[in-house]
Image (tube, rainbow, N blue to C red):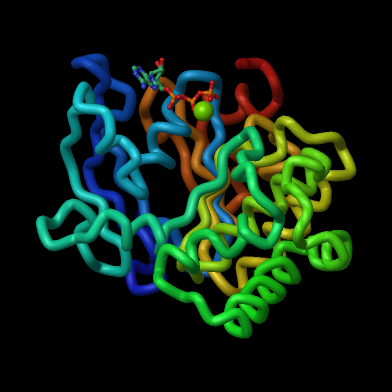
Amino acid sequence: MTDFDAAASCFAIDGLSLAYDGRPALRDLTLAIPRHAVTAFIGPSGCGKSTLLRALNRLHDLDDTVGRAGRIRLEGQDIHAPDVDVAELRRRVGMVFQTPNPFPMSIYDNVAFGLRLQGIKRKRTLDEVIEWALVSAALWDEVKDQLHTSAWRLSGGQQQRLVIARTLAVQPEVLLLDEPASALDPISTLKIEELIRSLKSRLTLVLVTHNMQQAARVSDYTAFLHDGELVEYGATDSLFTNPRLARTENYITGRMS
Ligand SMILES: Nc1ncnc2c1ncn2[C@@H]1O[C@H](COP(=O)(O)OP(=O)(O)OP(=O)(O)O)[C@@H](O)[C@H]1O
Ligand SMILES: [Mg+2]
């Protein structure tokens, strides 16, 4: 991408191809993801959005049928270099999925989970970080009087904000969100969108969405993928108002599903 300054990019993806059992899912993608911005991946079902998102924190490591070529750098460092600690990579690059997945424990213990794994035990420190994370995830006011009740008693939208709080608690630099609001009602969806916008002053966000309006509302940059290829990528305003390619225009106007 010529219009992105490499120095301002969080991820630099270079010639990335990925195949499941020999079947290509990503084809030679090169793009940079700007720091402190929201970048949306859009495109038809099966085009490779989740595959690309998961590549950014090496979730495909768990699947030995996946073949990869190309390079992904995070803040200049190759994420596949032999000295990279994958657990630390996943702390730096947090991930939130479509279906809220709080652990079967209290609200407090959910948010404390990653901190305790890091060996943080002091109650005062935990209390402080947990409040900060829940405030950051715009959930504190709704749960501050029930921190020790089960997370499963929360609504779907609250559970998704709890999962975001749990992810934020370990101070990631990047938050990957794979259709984080698609299982939620319209009001909860707007809360998640507001939250995404509010977080970009603090970290870099990458959002997969099927919802064109959502991409237009919350993202600064949009990448349109089709059949594993990066078709068009640029500032969201210009991609939506003045797409360069007919394929992009057909998709965003609903002529391609
Ligand atoms: N674990 C897997 N094993 C084998 N093939 C997979 C796997 N995950 C995805 N694929 C295939 O890779 C391609 C890209 O899938 P991916 O899930 O990245 O698409 P997507 O754009 O996220 O789609 P959706 O919008 O439906 O979530 C599809 O052809 C899919 O069938
Ligand atoms: Mg997907």
User: Is 216 situated left or right of 80 in this image?
Assistant: right
User: Is 67 situated left or right of 158 in this image?
Assistant: left
Residue at the extreme bottom? 124
User: Is 94 situated left or right of 146 in this image?
Assistant: left
Q: Is residue 237 visible?
A: no
Q: Residue at x 24, y 33 (%)?
A: 17
Picture coordinates of residue 252 (x, y %)?
65, 29
Taking 234 as reference, is 130 above or below it? below
Which residue is at the front of the view, 127 or 54?
Answer: 127
Taking 128 as reference, is 43 above or below it? above
Q: Residue at x 61, y 29 (%)?
A: 249
Q: Residue at x 18, y 43 (%)?
A: 70
Q: Is residue 170 visible?
A: yes
Which residue is at the front of the view, 202 or 105?
Answer: 105
Picture coordinates of residue 1 (x, y %)?
36, 53
**For residue 53, which quarter of the picture?**
top left
Picture coordinates of residue 176 (x, y %)?
51, 50
**For residue 137, which quarter of the picture?**
bottom right
Q: Quadrant of the C terminus?
A: top right
Which residue is at the front of the view, 103 or 46?
Answer: 103
Picture coordinates of residue 47 (x, y %)?
45, 23
User: Is 244 situated left or right of 64 in this image?
Assistant: right
**How many numbered circles does the render carry?**
0
Q: Residue at x 57, y 39 (%)?
A: 97
